Image: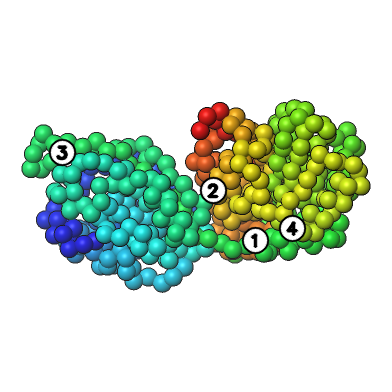
Amino acid sequence: MQSKSNTYFKEVASLWDDLRKGYFPDSLRDEVIKKAYLLPEMIVADIGAGSGFLSSLLVTKTEKVHLVDSSEAMLAQAKQNLTSYDNVEFHLAAGNDIPLPDDSLDAVFANMYLHHTSDPLAAIQEMARLLKPGGRLIISDLDLHTNTWMQEEMADEWPGFDREQVMAWFHIAKLVNNYVVCSGSNCCGASQNDPSLTADISTFIAIGSKHISRKADVKQSYGVIAESGGSCGCNPPQSSGGYQIVEQSCCPPKSSENSLYKLEELRVIPEEAGEISLGCGNPLAMASLKPGETVLDIGSGGGIDVFLAANRVGKTGRVIGVDMTPAMLKRARESALKNGYDQVEFRQGDAENLPVDDQSVDVVISNCVINLTEDKGKAFQEIFRVLKPGGRLEISDVVAAHNLPLAVRENPNQWAACVSGALPQGEYLELITYAGFENLTTQNNHQYSNNSEATYSLVVSARKPETN
């Protein structure tokens, strides 16, 4: 924070806990912490923590909390408030120069701090530096407002923020799975100098995650499957950081030959396509495809869902399969040519950068693929872009019941096994909503889960609005 902020907080430090209640409620803290999907073993930081509003709850949910503030008076108040806890470490430091190492934290919080810093982007980049791969940054702050008296009385550097500007800063900081939501509470208060001046300002929560680079591992793994002609290739039991993983999430139960598709469906597609079934559901079961529609299958693999879709849209329709693995594309293209599927096309690309024109597709399907992408938020935004107004999204994918431990998130084998890339279901659905989709419906399929029951298959249906 700047010196004028420190001057202000020095004056109000002893009163801040009571003043704060007039500006933002405890329910804001609860909602902010909920977005982090915390685990008891996590180490987190509270930046611009003031008297410890967030930290007072974080200390009960995590192994350790680093409380950072540039005001000596506020830090002293925080120490007094948290004196009974031994899992908090206090740091007198500015938010753009935090004395903690790179990649050391599971989550970083900044509640009502950003509008006090002169350079919000630099502050966001500094907080992102601290995150472990997959760690979350959660910022709560004021929406852009016109109450200039607040800036003058409370030493605010910024009159709140435009939410899309904050998302742009997250992107520059190389965070992924970025989205912003309404906090559900407003910042309310009255001027200390002129009681006739009041404010009722909406607040937001912005969430982003540290990038994990696993695309090369996934591409290599699925290339091996394509070249060997194998199927899901379930792994034997193994352990990662104490987290037991028994089989790939994309593998159907061994008691069932293939419970995803009906036998009559498989009989009318190329046999070689049915031999490679790497999915965790059947997105076509909910898609209600019509003759003449254009369908996009993301992560088309050997082409099983592409050929099934082609049979439904007929010769007047069109189906585009997109996959990033050359060996899979070669296999699928040869199958289409051999079996006379003229309405089918396979393109090289990935979910985050679809090689498809804007508003050119009626239905997007995907089967156990979005969890493999590193930036699922970008993938859903790309899907929204290529869909026509009123277009439909029908996907089966793997999600998690809770946050996954770091050792699992960084395991390249378990990324390819549709485990490590799974997001908590709530976060996954919020990314779809943030992309612009409406009418979301879901159906859980715990039949397709690993034995820890941490990850499972989810069927999601959604629609792009008729008008943007």
**Residue 182 lies in what quarter of the image?**
top left
Q: Secondary structure at mark 1?
A: helix
Question: Is label 4 in a helix, a strand or a loop?
Answer: loop
Q: Is residue 76 left or right of residue 334?
A: left
The kind of residue on which mark 3 rests is Ala
Q: Amino acid at mark 1?
A: Lys
Quadrant containing the N terminus is: bottom left
Q: Say whether disc 3 or disc 2 marks the residue closer to the N-terminus.
A: 3
Nearer to the camera, 98 or 313: 313
Q: Looking at the image, is mark 2 or mark 1 earlier in the sequence?
A: 1
Q: x and y percent of residue 257 in the render? A: 85, 43
Q: CA distance from mark 1 to mark 3?
A: 51 Å
Q: Nearer the viewer, residue 117 or 105?
A: 117
Amino acid on which the number 2 mark rests in the picture? Gly
Q: How is the image coloured?
A: rainbow
365 to 168, vertically: above or below: above
Q: Which mark is residue 284?
A: none
Mark 1 vs mark 4, CA separation in Å = 10 Å
Disc number for residue 190? 3
Q: Which residue is mark 4?
A: 325
Query: Between tags 4 and 3, which lies in front?
Result: 4
Residue 215 marker: 1
Label 4: how many Cα within 10 Å (few below 14, some 14–19, many 20+): many
Q: Which mark is residue 377?
A: 2
Of residue 395 and residue 389, the one placed in the foreground of this image is 389
